[in-house]
Image: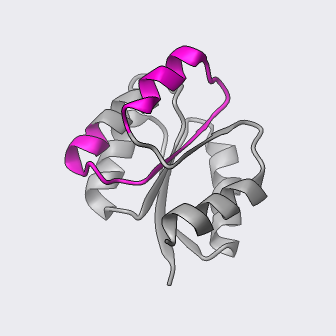
């Protein structure tokens, strides 16, 4: 069974490459968002199995998207992929019940393992 996903990251080139990798791993990438607002709209439209979410983006950031997505579905599965990760961010994220956090540059193998363990289960 395919896992359905969206990717929300303002770095479009890396998102497109990541989407291609996910397709190889039997993940159906339904859409790419460039900021938190687009991420929320994509979530409402597709109701994916998992959201890959960057935190630091222009306009509406990943925290905005995370908060709004969790309002829509408290059980939404979110994997954070970010270049900037601080203790303050960790504290803020702890209350949201996210699946995993990967810091850029990330290991695609580690992400694939996380999908298999936490999303397919």
Q: Is residue 73 above or below residue 20?
A: above
Residue at 52% x, 15% y is: 88
Residue at 44% x, 31% y is: 94
Front residue of 114 and 6:
114
* Quadrant hosting residue 71: top left
Q: Position of residue 118 (x, y in %)?
A: 53, 62
Q: Is residue 73 above or below residue 21?
A: above
With 29 as the anchor, is 108 left or right in this view?
right
Front residue of 94 and 30:
94
Q: Position of residue 40 (x, y in %)?
A: 32, 44
Color theme of the render: one colour
* Quadrant hosting residue 62: top left
* Residue 70 belongs to the span the image colors magenta: yes
Can you see residue 6?
yes
Residue at 41% x, 22% y is: 59
Q: Residue furthest top?
A: 88
* Residue 74 belongs to the span the image colors magenta: yes
Q: Is residue 117 above or below residue 2?
A: above
Q: Position of residue 16 (x, y in %)?
A: 65, 54
Q: Position of residue 72 (x, y in %)?
A: 21, 48
Number of marks: 0
Q: Which residues are magenta?
A: 68-96
Residue at 54% x, 36% y is: 54
Can you see residue 58?
no
Q: Residue furthest bottom?
A: 1
With 35 as the anchor, is 11 left or right in this view?
right
With 96 as the anchor, is 71 left or right in this view?
left
């Amino acid at each position: 069974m395919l896992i359905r996903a969206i990717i929300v990251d303002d770095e479009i080139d890396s998102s497109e490459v990541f989407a291609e990798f996910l397709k190889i791993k039997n993940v159906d990438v339904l859409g790419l968002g460039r900021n938190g607002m687009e991420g929320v709209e994509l979530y409402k439209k597709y109701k994916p199995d998992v959201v890959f979410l960057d935190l630091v983006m222009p306009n509406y950031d990943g925290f905005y998207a995370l908060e709004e997505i969790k309002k829509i579905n408290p059980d939404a599965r979110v994997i954070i992929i970010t270049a900037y990760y601080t203790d303050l961010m960790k504290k803020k994220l702890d209350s949201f019940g996210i699946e995993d956090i990967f810091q850029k540059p990330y290991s695609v193998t580690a992400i694939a393992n996380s999908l298999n363990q936490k999303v397919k289960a």
